[in-house]
Amino acid sequence: MARKAARFVCQQCGASHAKWGGRCDSCGGWNTLVEEAPVEATPRGLGSKRGRKIDFVGLDGDGEGAPRRATGIKEFDRVCGGGLVAGSALLVGGDPGIGKSTLLLQVAAALSGGLAVAYVSGEEAVDQVRLRARRLGLAQAGARLATGTSVRDIAASVDVADGPGAVVIDSIQTMYVDTIDAAPGTVTQVRASAQELIRLAKRRGFILFLVGHVTKEGLIAGPRVLEHMVDTVLYFEGERGHQYRILRAVKNRYGATDEIGVFEMSDAGLIEVSNPSALFLADRRGDVSGACVFPGMEGSRPVLVEIQSLIAPSALATPRRAVVGWDSGRLAMITAVLEARCGLSLASREVYLNVAGGLRIAEPAADLAVAAALASAASGTPVAEHSVVFGEVSLSGEVRAVAHADARLKEAAKLGFTGAIMPKRRGKAGAGAAKGRRPGGLEIVEIDHLRDLLALFPPLAEGRATGGQGGQGGRHGARRREPARHG
Ligand code: TYD
Ligand code: MG
């Protein structure tokens, strides 16, 4: 298909546009279009010149299942699917300052035991990297260090007879190919630089690590286009205020993508955390009422967050409702359902809801977790310790199944949780997810209706019991007829 030579390229998604605009039609990003040198238009066709014949082979050959090279950093190897494959390209993405250079220096040092490793920094001077190596206690490792940003120079240096077996490029956004008239960091340059380096890696059979900075939107700056070019995409993430870091495989041609590696930051670099639950639960007091852990999905990635709520008596005619990290409309809906369907009235009380760690949740799957946090706060009873809660709540109070239940459970199990409160799994024939398996051996409490959830909090259950079926009358039921809240 003939593609027009584009001049304006979205730095977020890589889409090209003939005209400049404030907003990218393709990804909706604002102010992301940058003028770049026109990419060569697709040739008009093959013409009459005949190509060289390519060879076809059978599927069964002696390419004995790509041998893997383990780094010895277990959390890293796990995310890579057991080790690194020669000739493969890995993209390590993450926010600036999250620790990518530190991680890769440690990986480079670990690999240098049995492999010639070249570490090319386009961002830091040799002395800076040396200083870091000394601080990490890796100064004696055999990795070779250089600075450079020209892909031509780098290629010339590693494409030699006794070239390295692993090359680290820190970062791909600083690299440039001199035949392309565009600034480093632009989509065109990043794409071209990566392509050259990946081609070289495949030809020479070295392991290529590309560091990529992530923009605010959570995409690697400019090149989401890189994700399809490399074999493995790893994201390194964590919160600045916390000392833990998570390495996640988003794509892996040589392994599963639902593995995570957990590290703890220290003065001496990243330390593997073999029992992440200890780290995650360290801050969390399981016996506190009003808090519960929600296994959310960020894109295809599960992330556990704590949802906290506080319910306080109010002297105001319209008690306050404050939400951080969730939709206030959705909170109003959950409180209304709790009131109308379960007889738990919060009308005369202030309700505060907070998603810990500054995360924003947009998923309806958090409904049940929010309801559990509210019920827990209202009853003063903690949610079952070491349990995660998820499920969508309908206006009738029914709890609906949500997508990625297995991924959520697996993540919870990985992080040391032992139970889950979740929607009933319907035994749909043929549906891969609903096999009644219990990933990671979690103890699962299946909930059909919000009433079943409240039954888990004894004070509420008793209150409801006095009200009889459907929550008519009784302690909580009596409050049901209070005027609706505003806001
Ligand atoms: P750095 O690896 O330079 O981040 P990135 O390459 O992703 O931009 O690390 C950022 C800073 O954090 C740096 O000043 C070193 C510090 N740091 C530690 O002190 N200990 C650690 O374990 C890590 C990972 C980083
Ligand atoms: Mg860096």
Image: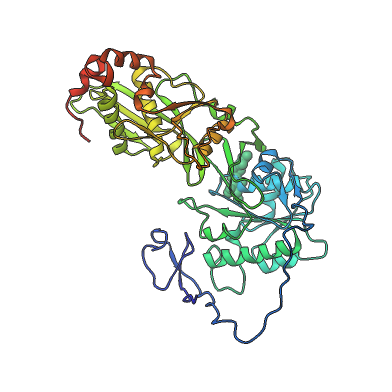
Camera-side residue: 265 or 386? 386
Furthest residue in direction front, as rendered: 429
**Side of 435 relative to 371 (left or right):** right
Q: Is residue 74 above or below residue 335?
A: below
Tell me where residue 357 appears, x and y as whole percent.
Answer: 46, 35
Identify the residue at image location x=66%, y=62%.
198
Ligand 1 shows up in the quarter that is top right
Position of the C terminus by quadrant: top left
**Closer-to-camera residue (132/187):** 187
Left or right position of 443 against 452: right
Residue 91 lies in quadrant: bottom right
Q: How is the image coloured?
A: rainbow
Is residue 434 visible in the rendered image? The answer is yes
**Relative side of 15 to 449, left or right:** right
- Residue positioned 27% across, 26% down in the render: 341
Query: x%, y% of residue 231?
Result: 64, 55
The single residue placed furthest to the bottom in the displayed view is 48
Q: Is residue 66 above or below residue 34?
A: above
User: In the depicted view, which residue is nearer to us: 58 or 279?
Assistant: 58
Q: Is residue 241 visible?
A: no
| Residue displayed at 62% across by 45% down | 256
Q: State which quadrant residue 229 falls in.
A: bottom right
Q: Position of residue 264 (x, y in %)?
A: 61, 35
Q: Residue at x 17, y 27 (%)?
A: 483
* Residue 133 locus on image (x, y percent): 71, 45
